[in-house]
Amino acid sequence: MQKDQKIYVAGHQGVIGSSIVKVLKGEGYTQLITKEKNELDLLDEKSVSDFFSEHKPAYVFLCAAKSGGFFFANKNSPEVIFENIQIQNNVISQAHQNNVVKLMFFGCSSIYPKYANLPLKEHSLLSGPLLSEKIPFSISKTTGAKLIEYLNREYQTCYLSVLPSNVYGTNDQMDPERAHVVALMLQKIHLAKHNNIPQVTFFGSGEADRDFIYADDLAQACLKLMKTPESRGDFNIATGNEITVKEMADIIKKEIGYQGEIVFDRNHHDGVLLKSQDIHKIKETGWEAKISPEEGIKKLYNWYLESQTQ
Ligand SMILES: NC(=O)c1ccc[n+]([C@@H]2O[C@H](COP(=O)([O-])OP(=O)(O)OC[C@H]3O[C@@H](n4cnc5c(N)ncnc54)[C@H](OP(=O)(O)O)[C@@H]3O)[C@@H](O)[C@H]2O)c1
């Protein structure tokens, strides 16, 4: 990947896309292409085709997606399936037709089958029934991962499909239905402190283990893979260090300086209690996560405070 080759980051305003842009700029890549949704709606096949014909990017990070939390995905199941598959098909097919050197597609650890053995290995995709609450998202993302696999097999491309764990980072949209869980927890605790609310309640037991990865760490891993010409196929990306949701809440509470109490409402379910991923493949590239949860939360809180003043 040469510093002056054209790199298109789709979804550059999102949590992951914005970190990828930041890391690329930091490493001196000069020909970054980004388009806002109102300039290029990735659902529109003709616009995507025209864009690729005009710009001819050499590398593509496909971070754009219809994403959101559990309630959002459940309420918007048809849109989640339709939009994700449409965006993926448009971008991946145009990348292929326009001889993109390398493309990275983003799946997610939650698309693994319900009973897949832990730690989750890349080859376990599609090896059993999916988590019922994740079906719309899992079906669409698994379709993208399989499309990448078959393109690599039939056309000898070196496209990548990454499966990150729970990502958190700056540029979250903070909409309660669409924001990522860590940002929502942070906002809730921040507001409780500022409104002198003595107790904050989160759904679930707080005992679920999660591998929270800061988006800049993820972006470094993605860049490493894109810079390796022969890398292809599926890659789990996670820190390898899990903590419970309660431990994450305590880290946020400490950073914010909230003196109240954090309560977990066990009447609501936790989702999967354990979902550790096997990260041997990504670690073989020499990458490892560097940002601790404490450091990541500090960065996220600084961004959040700044964003509130704009
Ligand atoms: N965050 C996580 O925990 C996590 C974990 C694993 C995998 N992933 C995957 O990684 C990818 C990026 O995640 P993220 O957290 O960065 O998501 P995000 O913050 O929601 O960003 C996605 C971006 O895509 C844009 N987009 C959606 N539809 C579009 C369209 N039709 N045309 C152009 N742009 C469009 C969105 O714009 P609007 O906001 O205007 O719609 C948004 O800026 C997604 O595929 C996600 O599933 C995320």
Image (tube, rainbow, N blue to C red):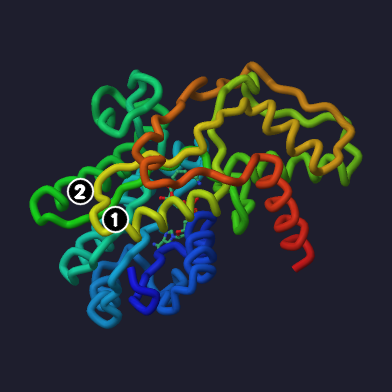
Q: Is residue 68 above or below residue 2?
A: above
The mark found on residue 88 in the picture is: 1
Q: CA distance from mark 2 to mark 1?
A: 9 Å
Mark 1 Cα shell of 10 Å, populated few (<14), some (14-19), many (≥20): many
Residue 200 relative to residue 121: left or right: right
* The residue positioned farthest toward the left in the image shown: 154
In the image, residue 2 lies at what x, y percent?
34, 73
Q: Is residue 204 above or below residue 47?
A: above
| Residue drawn at x 63%, y 17% as measured from the top left | 267
In the image, residue 294 lies at what x, y percent?
71, 41
Residue 33 relative to residue 55: left or right: right
The secondary element bearing badge 1 is classed as helix
The mark found on residue 147 in the picture is: 2
| Residue drawn at x 71%, y 58% as measured from the top left | 303
Q: Is residue 90 above or below residue 180?
A: below
Q: Quadrant of residue 41?
A: bottom left
- The amino acid on which the numbered mark 2 sits, given as a three-letter code, is Leu
| Residue drawn at x 40%, y 24% as measured from the top left | 119
Q: Are marks 2 and 1 in contact (CB under 8 Å)?
A: yes
- Closer-to-camera residue (277/108): 277
The mark found on residue 161 in the picture is: none
